[in-house]
Amino acid sequence: MFHMNRVFKFAFSHLNGIKVFALVGRSGTGKSHHSKLLAQKYHIDLIIDDGLLIRGDKILAGRSAKRDPNFITAVRTAVFDEEQHREEVQAALLKEKYKKILIIGTSEKMINKIINRLELPPVTRVFHIEEIATQEEIETAMRIRFTEGKHVIPVPSIEITRSYPQIVYDSIKVFFGKKVPFKKEKGFEKTIVRPEFSRPDKDSLNEVTLNQMVKHCIDEYDKVIKVKKVRLNQNKNMSYNLNITLQVPLRHYIGQSMSELQSYIADCIEKYGGIRIEGVSIEIEEWG
């Protein structure tokens, strides 16, 4: 295993001319749907989305986070936390001829974590979902996500059914308009899935479950920071406000601003908990 890792590091450190693009946006805003449009426009060869390596209509390698039964395993799958999963995708990347790859994530921190784990070059350009989708499209996507628990995987349903038949909900064909300058492909099929971790059943949500989710998010963000307490308030629109008390060692430097940490927690829970977070307030207690 050590020798294999060393080979990967050598191979990926000598990548020439590979451009990495990122598509960033909050959970449920339609990133997976718009990723194909983005790939077509900028002639991007490969897409990494929720643990899968995708080329055109084919899944080349990986494991979908959308098939995982719970929040924690879904998060780990999406960022290639497991060594075997990581090396499978790295091996597939070594075999492929490509110049451009698109990574989809809820934050630039998530994108960078995937890049580091797959040993890819730094991001060339970051696209935000607001740049390529209208506000109406984003609001519609979020409504479907948080009321019906539906997600999108940007490959035909036959590809998903082979490995994950239990999560397939529907499929839809997307056609390009006349103004879109694509000649070879006139459209593509996407698969609508309803993962186990994203069922719209909010009755089981409680502070113990939420506490576990927040602890895992914080552990992924910064292992030194500890979660002391999590309180939640449910709003009339079925969204939640979180009040979190964190314990931070004296003089410990938190890598990003407080607003970025708040967004990171909200995005993480929204994406893999199927729960809409309206706001996150954080109280810091220093110790040591």
Image (cartoon, rainbow, N blue to C red):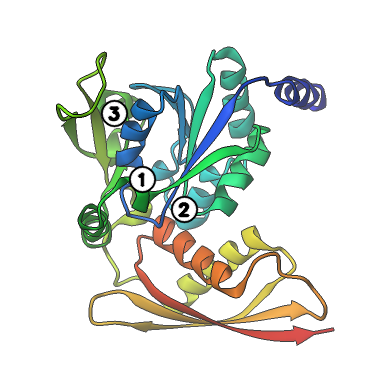
Provide the residue designation for mark 2: 106
Q: Amino acid at mark 1?
A: Lys
On the image, the x and y values in percent for residue 36 come to: 33, 32
Q: Which residue is disc 1 drawn over?
A: 31
Q: Amino acid at mark 2?
A: Thr
Is 48 situated above or below 223? above
Whether residues under marks 3 and 1 lie with C-beta atoms below 8 angstroms apart, the answer is no
Foreground disc of the pair 3, 1: 1
Position of the N terminus by quadrant: top right
Q: Is residue 213 visible?
A: no
Tell me which corner region of the image, top left, top right, bottom left or bottom right, holds residue 173: top left
User: Dot 3 corresponds to which residue?
Assistant: 161
Please name the residue shown 61% across and 33% down the image: 86
**Secondary structure at numbered mark 3:** helix
Mark 1 lies on a secondary structure that is helix
C-alpha span from label 3 to label 1? 21 Å
Q: Earlier in the sequence, mark 2 or mark 1?
A: 1
- First in sequence, mark 3 or 1: give its number: 1
Would you call the spot at circle 2 few (<14 residues within 10 Å), some (14-19), or many (20 or more)?
many
Image: 92 above or below 206: above
Q: In terms of image quadrants, where is residue 156?
A: top left
Tell me the CA gap for discs 3 and 2.
Answer: 26 Å
In this rendering, does residue 90 appear at all? yes
C-alpha separation, residue under disc 2 versus residue under disc 1 = 9 Å
